[in-house]
Image: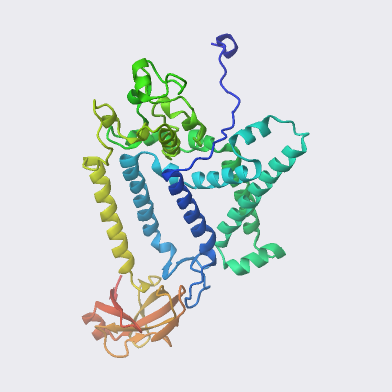
Amino acid sequence: MDNQQSGKELYFKRVPVVPRSIQGGFRRFKTAILWLGFAVYFLLPWLPWSREGAPSQAVMFDIPGRRYLIFNLTVYPQDIFWLALLLFIAAVVLFFATALVGRAFCGYFCFQTLWTDAFIWLEKWFQGERPARLRLSRESWSKREKLLKVGGTRIAWALLSFWTALTFVFYFGYAPELLQTFFTGDAPAAAYITTLVLTISTYAAAGLLREHVCTFICPYGRFQSAMYDPETLTVHYDRRRGEGAAGRASARAGARAREERSALGHGDCVDCGLCAQVCPVGIDIRDGLQYTCISCGLCVDACDSIMDKMGWPRGLVRYDSEVNLARSAPTPPKLHWKSLKVLGYGVSIVLMTGYLIYDMSHRSSFEHSIQQIRQPLFVTLSDGTIRNRYQIRLTNISGAEETYAISARGLPEGALDLGNFESVTIRNGKSVIIQASVMLDPHRAREIDHFEFLIRNGKGESVVDPARFFTKH
């Protein structure tokens, strides 16, 4: 049916969400996470960290050097398994948290939440509290006040977006040097392109789109319901307590005391709307559980503040489970972790984390590969001696310059020819290819078809690699 005939529109004009500030335990927790997250993100590239043969920066992703410096750990592209395992652990931790406390990750730890909170704080600092911002939005752009306040807000957003983007770039180079070259025009083109793209995307996501990122763009909001259980703790409105038999009503004369309201059939909800005003995604928690709810708990703080003013018990809006709310006499909320799904997530996290730590702590300080040169497989010299050639590749991943000694077991003395590379010094993160030859007289060649290469570093670590000696195709 044609949309005009049906009278319905596929699209609606976006009504910006203008949240009110609120104080309370959940707001304080969100603020603490915000400052902690910003401190880690913005200060980490500037944290000095002494290491040999690399910039003194605690965390740096050295793309040209094909290495990732993370404190005392140096990660190379061949360690991609660690990244895959880390992503798996992060996904399972997210599922584990969702099964226990719903979409709390979105409410407190998501980058979109953190930067949107910061943008809202700047907006409040320039334009005032929610009523002042709403009034300002209705005024004409010809008003000087609106130009100054809104313009100041947008400039502050742009500066924060720019510094966010530039800080991201700092992770891919030595920050003090990159900062200087960036503003003198000598930085690589990739630095300017990345900064421009991330500045625009940060400004758009945290300043313009905001709740639409959580509602329409982020896939997590769509599939999170599949991970919910009836015992999952998430933000709920206690409809039975709040509505009563006659529904909610304002605290007017004759309906202010709980006894008066009970006699009239009204619940504890005074219909102040504060829970909806503080919501950063613009929903009313009293309409029931909604997929757009990010479980940030600000509506809990708002409702608790009203209950405190009225002198009534807190918890009309609270973290609770559907099972507990359905009881005739709800008990205090608690985490329900004794389910097969939650236990499975927990066991997976412990096992995979343990294996990752074990693998990282037992990684060899060097990598090697030995390949026989097969073109030709062997060569018979003029005196009848048979020669096989091998290519040895050594990569130093110890974190410092290291010297390696190469020898062979199972061969007569003088049979192994390494040129001048019986020992070789390799800088950290670098590789060296060594050509080796093994020459045996016909009699020894018939007796020896296997031997071993022995590679040892200065710390006493060694590896033994078997090799074959060919005398015929």
Q: Is residue 62 visible?
A: no
Give the color scheme: rainbow, by chain, secondary structure or one colour. Answer: rainbow
- Residue 368 in the image: above or below residue 309: below
| Observer-nearest of 380 and 11 | 11
Residue at screen point 68% across, 34% down: 136
Task: Point out the residue furthest to the top here.
Answer: 5
In the rendered image, which quarter contains the C terminus? Answer: bottom left
- Residue 189 location (% of width, % of height): 66, 59
Residue at left 45%, top 48%? 28
Q: Quadrant of residue 289?
A: top left
Q: Position of residue 62 (x, y in %)?
A: 52, 65
Q: What residue do we see at 32% from left, 60% from top?
A: 356
* Image position of 170 with respect to 5: above or below: below
Q: Quadrant of residue 385?
A: bottom left
Where residue 153 sits: x, y (%)?
66, 44
Q: Is residue 17 left or right of residue 101?
A: right
